[in-house]
Image (tube, helix red, strand yellow):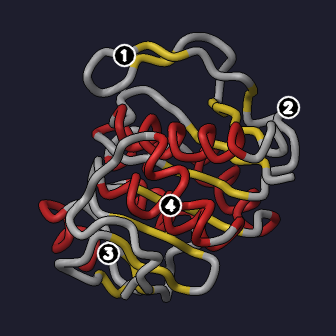
Amino acid sequence: MTTYGLLVFEEAEELDFVGPWEVFTVSAMLRDGADRAVLVAEHPGPVRCNKGLRVLPDHTLDDHPPLDVLHVPGGRGAREAQLHNRVVTDWIGKTAEQAAWVHGVCTGTFLLHAAGPARGRRVATHWSQEDTLQARGDVTVVRDVRYVVDGNLVTSQGVSAGIDSALWLVGRLHGREHARAVRRYIQYDPAPPYLADEPV
């Protein structure tokens, strides 16, 4: 069983977590419910995201199940308020040490850098924030690629690129044919299509 934990917070970019959520939950469905995905937030109440979507987390930072995959989205909240929220960054650092995989999308990489998992690693982030992240030091920002894998850390460029990296991850976890079945089910048709290609 794979448990995916997707962090949400005020002003998180919606598709940064909703796109991977779709990949992870369809993957679980095609595996006859063998896996599950949960939303995790600092507080139990509704969270208002970057474009106004409100979501209700399943768990708080203190009461979630053990996570095999930790997912960190980006958005204004990631690179501004949450970047300075020690409760969240400490939780990310601790949880990342216990998870098999850490998955960041867009400027979620800023949070992963602040929390520690992205330090000294090769990463991707939104194109508009590449210079800013590189300037923080102790990180190598790879440009002009949809996603980057460095050990157990998978990071992607902004928004829809999170779907690409999530597909790669479920392919790594459950096989290439399974990832192709997920891609077909969600009718995601990137160019080129998912071919289980090796990331940069």
Q: Which residue corresponds to the image point at 56% horizontal and 74% vertical from the top-left?
A: 153
Question: In the current view of this chain or complex, which residue is farthest to the left?
Answer: 128
Residues at discs 3 and 1 in contact (Cβ within 8 Å): no
Amino acid type shown at disc 3: Arg
Mark found first going from the N terminus, 1 or 4? 1
Q: Residues within 10 Å of mark 3 (few under 14, many from 20)?
A: few
Q: Pointer 2: what residue?
A: 63
Residues at discs 1 and 4 in contact (Cβ within 8 Å): no
Q: Which residue corresponds to the image point at 76% horizontal and 69% vertical from the top-left?
A: 100
Of labels 1 and 2, the one closer to you: 1
Of labels 4 and 3, the one closer to you: 4
Residue 180's disc number: 4
Q: Position of 118 compared to 92: left or right?
A: left
Amino acid type shown at disc 4: Arg
Q: Give the quadrant of residue 148.
A: bottom left
Q: Position of 113 compared to 27: left or right?
A: left
Look at the picture and state if 9 lies above or below 3.
Answer: above
Q: CA distance from mark 3 to mark 2?
A: 32 Å
Q: Residues within 10 Å of mark 4 (few under 14, many from 20)?
A: some
The percent position of residue 151, horizontal first and vertical second, equals: 60, 86
Amino acid type shown at disc 1: Leu
The percent position of residue 200, horizontal first and vertical second, equals: 37, 88
Of labels 3 and 2, the one closer to you: 2
Mark found first going from the N terminus, 4 or 3? 3
Residue 53's disc number: 1
Q: Position of 107 compared to 130: left or right?
A: right
* Front position in the image: 176 or 70: 176
Mark found first going from the N terminus, 2 or 4? 2
